[in-house]
Image (cartoon, rainbow, N blue to C red):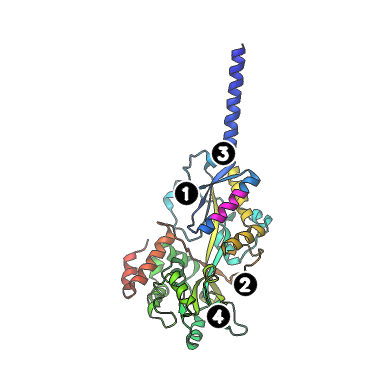
Amino acid sequence: MDRARFFHGGMLCVVALGAAVLSSWSRGAPLILAVSSPDLRQEVARLAADYSKRTGFHLTLADAAPAESSIHGRGVTVTVDWSFAEASDPAREAARQPVRQPVPNAALEKSGFSTALAFERWCQGDGGWREVPILWDAWGYATSRRQAPGADMTFAWKDRQAALMSGQKIAAPGGEPGVRQSLFWFTNGPLPGQDDLIGVLRGGAQRLGPSVRASFQFLAAVAQDPLFTPGSAVMMKGDVENLARNGSVDGLFGNYQWLRGVPGSARRDFRIFACSLPRGQGYAVPVSLLSGSVVGSGSAAVQAQDFLAWLASPEIQKDLSQKTGYMAANFNAVNLDANALGARVAAARAAWIVPIDPDPRKGSTADSWDALLGRVLARPSEWQRTLAESGTR
């Protein structure tokens, strides 16, 4: 009788322990930081650890998503990565593989999140936000020369002639992924329509259209363009920093986060790069969006969504922005400086964004697109052949 009671009590303990373990597993999810920047990884990981301690929802750093059958997090995964136009996968969709779980609008509104309409248009989908913007980076032009009174906060093709007439030279690290992606759209003509733009990025037949071919032709001609310092097509950021340090150049083209730290004898003002849109629809801005997304369902997915909403709150955004030098995607957060404010105002007035991935993951859609642009710059005289060889889906 005592043995039976002991056995029964022992089984209850095992069941209770098992329930506690399963409960602890269900109170967490793997966090994939798909970025290579040490500063970004460190700061997002730090905030995730702080959130885990405060809420008991354990975010464990992982290199890849676990198998769908994994007990840990019941298949829920949180990913932080640079946003891009990922290729659709009909086979995966037909097999009903895990898809992104939209973060409800109400969750972000509760956290005090507000951003540019162009960011919303890119990141929102049915039922909420497919991706939650966390940080952003603008691409554009920086110079210590005084801007004309009343000049707008953007730099576009229409400003090119004035820069040439003033004897301005611009150095661009065209050997860097994000720079060559943004340079591709610096042409005298409107962007393709938004659906066609996504088709171009995904490798569709839209790449063969006349306006897009003109962009490829311009990119191939960057090495001979009088606006750019010789060598800009293949320079790396370190090369441009050396030119700026010794006073060889003043005008610089690149991303805001990098440009604000480039050495020089005088403070440079930054103007965000803008592209005209078809049929008088305004302009678009090439930007990089660091976004968070959730895959999975159930209570763990809701808790993962709450984590992303917390990352998007003004105070956390301010902290993350100041630690990394990128701009807060929540426009209610404090700006880094006057240049960041100007970029924010320009982004708020934009109708679309053109996604730029500065850190393409191997094998991704962004990697395929960026590699094609790299091949065009490496063999500028053969750009048409390179484009033909790339094929389309």
| Cα distance between the residues tagged 4 and 2 | 21 Å
Q: Is residue 162 above or below residue 21?
A: below
Q: Which residue is identified by label 1?
A: 63
| Lower sequence index among marks 1 and 4 | 1
**Closer to the camera in the image, 202 or 133:** 133
Q: Which residue is identified by label 4?
A: 144
Image spot of residue 48 (x, y percent) = 59, 50
Q: Residue at x 58, y 52 (%)?
A: 46
Q: Can residue 281 be seen in this view?
A: no
Q: Is 34 a magenta residue?
A: no
Foreground mark, 3 or 2, reads: 3
Q: Can residue 312 be seen in this view?
A: yes
Q: Which residue is identified by label 3?
A: 25
Local packing at callout 1 (Cα closer than 10 Å; few below 14, some 14-19, many 20+) is few
Kindly state the secondary structure of the residue where label 1 is placed.
loop
Q: Residue at x 43, y 67 (%)?
A: 176
The amino acid type of the residue labelled 4 equals: Ser
Name the chief secondary structure element in magenta. helix
| Cα distance between the residues tagged 3 and 2 | 43 Å
Direction bottom: furthest residue: 165
Kindly state the secondary structure of the residue where label 3 is placed.
helix
| Cα distance between the residues tagged 1 and 3 | 18 Å
Q: Which residue is identified by label 2?
A: 345
Residue interval drawn in magenta: 42-50
Local packing at callout 4 (Cα closer than 10 Å; few below 14, some 14-19, many 20+) is some
48 to the left or right of 390: right
| Lower sequence index among marks 1 and 2 | 1
The amino acid type of the residue labelled 3 equals: Trp
Quarter of the figure that contains the N terminus: top right
